Image (cartoon, rainbow, N blue to C red):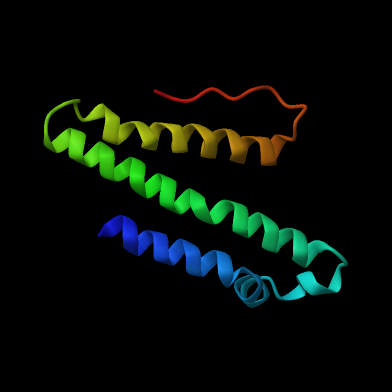
Amino acid sequence: MMVLVVGLVVAAGILASPWLVRLYAVGFSATPGKLETTVLMNRIMFPYLLLISLALIVAGVFAFEEVVGQPVVLGSDDVDHFFSVHGISWLRRGPEGPAPTLPR
């Protein structure tokens, strides 16, 4: 049931991408091609919501059935933390800066 609901949200988001982009990116229509590119990127990224939902449902089922331990569910947080720390550091220093290390 959850997959059906998320699938409908994803399908509606893909179909409504031009209106959604105009709603949250008001000035993009002033630059030629920027609005169309953003709509295309939005349509490409919407299925990510469905794929992540499926992955978390499977991880939850595995954790409930004790097929695998808790690290499967918590592993996505580590990946998000890694990319957010490195992404923020890259934005602050630029691509020339040294690679930051993660505190553990």
Which residue extends farthest left? 65
Task: Name which residue lies at 42% across and 52% down.
Answer: 50
| Rendered view: 20 above or below 96 | below
Number of residue marks: 0
| Rendered view: 26 above or below 47 | below
Task: Name which residue lies at 62% across and 59% down.
Answer: 42
* Residue 18 position within the rendered picture, expressed as x and y whole percent measured from the top left: 66, 72
Quadrant in the rendering for residue 92: top right
* Residue 1 position within the rendered picture, expressed as x and y whole percent measured from the top left: 25, 60
Task: Name which residue lies at 74% across and 35% down.
Answer: 94
Front-most of residues 59 and 90: 59
Say whether residue 81 is left or right of residue 86: left
Front-most of residues 64 and 7: 7
Front-most of residues 54 and 22: 54
* Residue 90 position within the rendered picture, expressed as x and y whole percent measured from the top left: 67, 35
Q: Which quarter of the rendered picture does the C terminus lie within?
A: top left
Which residue extends farthest right? 32
Front-most of residues 34 and 43: 43
Task: Name which residue lies at 76% across and 64% down.
Answer: 36
Say whether residue 62 is left or right of residue 7: left
Quadrant in the rendering for residue 4: bottom left
| Rendered view: 39 above or below 104 | below
* Residue 79 position within the rendered picture, expressed as x and y whole percent measured from the top left: 44, 32
